Amino acid sequence: MIFLRIFDQGQCNFQNLFDGPISTYESNIVFVLRFMIDTKVVGMNWIEVPAGKYKVTPPTKKRSSCQLELTFRCVCLFR
């Protein structure tokens, strides 16, 4: 996500390849929504994570109001 902002704000300069701010491909679609579309994840849906491939987030570090919050690498969903 930071990478996209660097392009959008014109902060990326590689051998004078970019002249100021440029729009990235489909930059009008937020990153999270793009991820959900590409991986066919829909809102209010169950996601099955294989046993042993996740860690339960402690209540003090949760970033949502979900009853259960997990941390895992998304590649484990697509194997």
Image: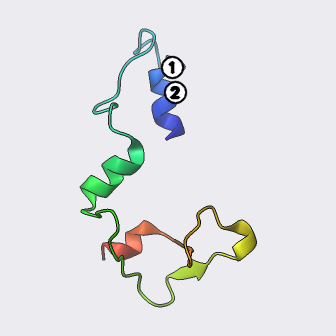
* Residue farthest along the top direction in this orientation: 19
What residue sits 59% from the left and 63% below the top? Answer: 64
Left or right side of 18 for 61? right
Q: Is residue 42 left or right of residue 55?
A: left
Q: How is the image coloured?
A: rainbow
Left or right: residue 72 versus residue 22 is right
Residue 53 located left or right of residue 26 = right
Question: Tags 1 and 2 in contact by the CB under 8 Å rule?
Answer: yes
* Residue positioned 39% across, 69% down in the render: 75
How packed mark 2 is, by other alpha carbons closer than 10 Å (few <14, some 14-19, many 20 or more), is some
On the rendered image, what quadrant is the C terminus found in?
A: bottom left
Residue type marked 2? Ile
Residue at mark 1:
9
Tell me the amino acid under the disc marked 1. Gln
Counting labels gives 2
Residue wearing tag 2: 6
Q: Secondary structure at mark 2?
A: helix
The image position of residue 51, as x and y in percent, is 46, 90
Q: Residue at x 36, y 81 (%)?
A: 48
- Residue 45: give x, y in percent of width and height: 32, 72
- In the displayed orientation, state which residue is furthest to the right: 60
Q: CA distance from mark 1 to mark 2?
A: 5 Å
Q: Is residue 9 above or below residue 73?
A: above
Judged from the image, the secondary structure of the residue bearing numbered disc 1 is loop
Residue at point 41%, 14% (across, down): 18
